[in-house]
Each structure stands twice: as C-alpha cells, then as structure tokens.
Image (cartoon, rainbow, N blue to C red):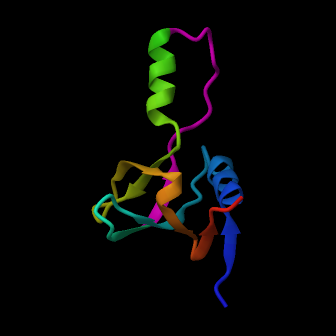
Amino acid sequence: MVMKIHLKDAMRQIQLSSGSQKTFAITYQKKDGTYGEKDECRNRSGYYSKGKSDLASIKHETKRAGKAILEYRTRSGAWQPFEVFWCLMRTFDGREIDHRF
C-alpha cells in the first residue's frame, strides 16, 4: 500500500523546513507531461515581513501564487533555485500527495 500525504501537510512541512538544513525529495509532473525528480530539495522562500503593499509587490506575489519556491542540490554540490506548481507535485519524501484536501 502506498503511503499518502495531504497537500496541506506537505506544504506545512516545507514551510517549517525554512531556515534549516532539512532536505526532502519530490516528484513532479513537467509541462510536457513527463515526470521529474529532485532528491535533495529545501525551502528557499523564507519568512519575510510584509510592509505596505504597492503595485509592484502585488504583481510579484501574484506571479508566485500557487508555486513552491525551492532549491535543490546539483551534482557539484551547489544549490540551484527551482519553482514548481503545487498542483503538479506528485510525491513528497516518497509519499503520494493527495490533492483533494
């Protein structure tokens, strides 16, 4: 039996890992329909304080809406920025993501 995790729980675990060295693995669907994997990912969005919203910040937030802002370790050991839509993420740490909730 495949273990599952609800999307909100995966999002929460990613959010909680911000600022730590904890990594996780994900599988996601690409735009062309194929699947990709990243074995060593970490949250890159971090926490930031919101000031007064201006038009530029609203456009920036809208552009990133629905995306996980991550980075993954390359073979050379460097961290590479990476964004993936939540709705295209299929597994989190080996557990299938349930998108119903």
Residue 22 placement: quadrant: bottom right
Residue under the point 52% across and 56% down: 87
Task: Tell me if 27 is positioned left or right of 30 in this view.
Answer: right
98 or 37: which is nearer to us? 98
Residue under the point 45% across and 24% down: 60
37 or 41: which is nearer to us? 37
In the image, residue 32 lies at what x, y percent? 28, 62
Looking at the image, is 93 positioned above or below residue 67?
Answer: below
Residue under the point 61% across and 68% down: 97
64 within the magenta span: no
How many numbered badges does the structure rendering display?
Answer: 0
Residue under the point 47% across and 50% down: 85
Name the magenta segment's main secondary structure.
Answer: loop
Task: Tell me if 18 is positioned left or right of 54 in this view.
Answer: right
40 within the magenta span: yes
Q: Furthest-bottom residue in view?
A: 1
Picture quarter with the N terminus: bottom right
Looking at the image, is 97 positioned above or below residue 61?
Answer: below
43 or 78: which is nearer to us? 43
Picture quarter with the C terminus: bottom right
Looking at the image, is 92 positioned above or below residue 50?
Answer: below
Q: Furthest-front residue in view?
A: 100
In the image, residue 21 lies at what x, y percent? 57, 54
In the image, residue 90 lies at what x, y percent? 51, 68
In the image, residue 88 lies at what x, y percent? 47, 59
Q: Which residues are magenta?
A: 39-54
